Amino acid sequence: MHRSLFVVPVLAAVLCGCASTSSPSSGSSGSSASRTAAAGPSAAAKLANLDGITNPSPAQIAEYQQALTMLDKGCGGTDDANAALVNATRDLNAKDGVHDSELTIAQAVAQTAATGAVKGCQGLFAAWSTLRDPG
C-alpha cells in the first residue's frame, strides 16, 4: 500500500504534540540541565527504549543522540520533534511489514539531511517511509 507523503508529518505532529519546534534560548546551562533532568530521559534514550534497549549505556545513547543532532543540524527542529518523526515513521512502516529500528531510520534520514539540500525533515521521513513500503 502506497501512502501519501503527508501522513508521516501529520502522525508526528500528533505524537509529539508540538506546535512549535523552537527551544528556549535564555537561561543558564544549570537551569536547562535541571529542566532536562526533571523532564525525564532524553529523546535519544527514549528512542533506544523504543528499540527494546531498556537500560541503554551512555555509548548507546550517544549513537542515537548523534543521529538526532545530525537531524537537528540538517533540517532544523528539536530532538523531541525529530524523535517523534522517527517513531511515527517506524510505526507507519511496521504496519506494512517493514521493521527498521528507530536508529536505522534516524541515521538514514540524517545522512540525507546532512547534505543540506532540504530544510524540514518531514518530507525526508515521508520519502523514507514511501521508499521502504514493500507494496
Image: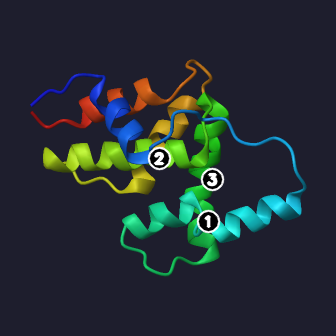
Of tags 1 and 3, the one toward the viewer is 1
Per the model, the C-alpha gap separating discs 1 and 3 is 20 Å
For disc 2, the marked residue is 106
Relative height, residue 72 to residue 122 (above, below): below
In this orientation, which residue lies closer to the viewer: 4 or 60?
4
Relative height, residue 63 to residue 107 (above, below): below
Q: Quadrant of residue 127?
A: top left
- Residue 16 rendering spot, x and y as whole percentages: 45, 46
Q: Residue at x 18, y 35 (%)?
A: 133
Of tags 2 and 1, the one toward the viewer is 1
Q: Secondary structure at mark 2?
A: helix
Disc 1 marks a residue whose amino acid type is Ala
- Residue 94 rendering spot, x and y as whole percentages: 20, 50
- Residue 41 rendering spot, x and y as whole percentages: 57, 68
Q: Secondary structure at mark 3?
A: helix
For label 2, count other residues whose C-alpha is less than 10 Å away and answer few (under 14), some (14-19) or many (20+): many
Q: Secondary structure at mark 1?
A: helix
For disc 3, the marked residue is 66
- First in sequence: mark 1 or mark 3? 1
Q: Visible in this render: residue 123?
A: yes
Q: Visible in this render: residue 128?
A: no
- Residue 4 rendering spot, x and y as whole percentages: 22, 22
In this orientation, which residue lies closer to the viewer: 102 or 114?
102
Per the model, the C-alpha gap separating discs 2 and 3 is 9 Å
Q: Residue furthest bottom?
A: 55
Q: Residue at x 13, y 44 (%)?
A: 96
For disc 1, the marked residue is 39
Q: Residue at x 46, y 66 (%)?
A: 48
Q: Are marks 2 and 1 in contact (CB under 8 Å)?
A: no
Disc 3 marks a residue whose amino acid type is Gln
